[in-house]
Amino acid sequence: MLESLFSLLIVIIIASFIPLLFQNYASVLKVIDIDKNYEWQLFINHTRKELNTGTQITVTDHKITFFSQSKLVTYENYRNLTRRSINNKGHEPILTNVKQDRWSKRSNEELLYEVKFEDGTELSARFHIHSERIK
């Protein structure tokens, strides 16, 4: 009888920890989502700032090039990330876990960047550019 009560006590203690485990798991998922959103917002802000000062902007499906402060800046897809390079040198990852991406010129004053991440999330950003800067 005593062994049964002890076993029941152990089961109750273990069962009481299950909601805490789920709560912690949900918190971890929320932090991961915040990190991804933070990375996306940094990417948008940095890209917008560079494009506003850039000239001779050239757009292809998976690549955009432009001149900024007399240097050739390239944003391109490389493996599972979007990277930035200057004068075709260097490798600066600016967006990670990218499954596919696409740059397109929507009009003479608007660029669109569409990205699908490895977890299935799809995001897009529009960048307004002065028409004389686009090639």
Image (cartoon, rainbow, N blue to C red):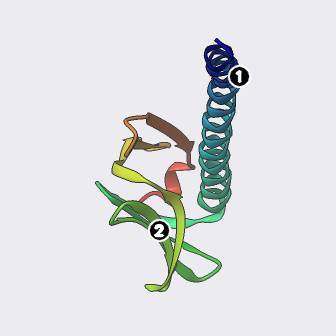
Residue 37 percent location from the top left of the image: 63, 41
Q: Could you tell me if the residues under marks 1 and 2 are in contact, i.e. CB atoms within 8 Å?
A: no
| Placement of the N terminus among the 4 image quadrants | top right
Answer few, some or many: residues within 10 Å of disc 1's Cα (few below 14, many 20 plus, some between 14 and 19).
Answer: few
Identify which residue is drawn at 59% across, 45% down: 36
Identify which residue is drawn at 32% across, 58% down: 62
Q: Which residue is mark 1?
A: 13
* Whether residue 35 is situated above or below residue 67 in the rendered picture: above
In the picture as drawn, the residue positioned furthest to the front comes out as: 1
| Residue nearest the viewer, comparing 51 with 56 | 51
Q: Quadrant of residue 24?
A: top right
| Placement of the C terminus among the 4 image quadrants | bottom left
Amino acid under disc 2: Arg
| Residue nearest the viewer, comparing 42 with 110 | 42
Q: Secondary structure at mark 1?
A: helix
Identify which residue is drawn at 52% across, 39% down: 126
| Residue nearest the viewer, comparing 119 with 70 | 119
Separation of disc 1 and disc 2 at Cα? 50 Å
Answer few, some or many: residues within 10 Å of disc 2's Cα (few below 14, many 20 plus, some between 14 and 19).
Answer: some
Q: Which residue is mark 2?
A: 83
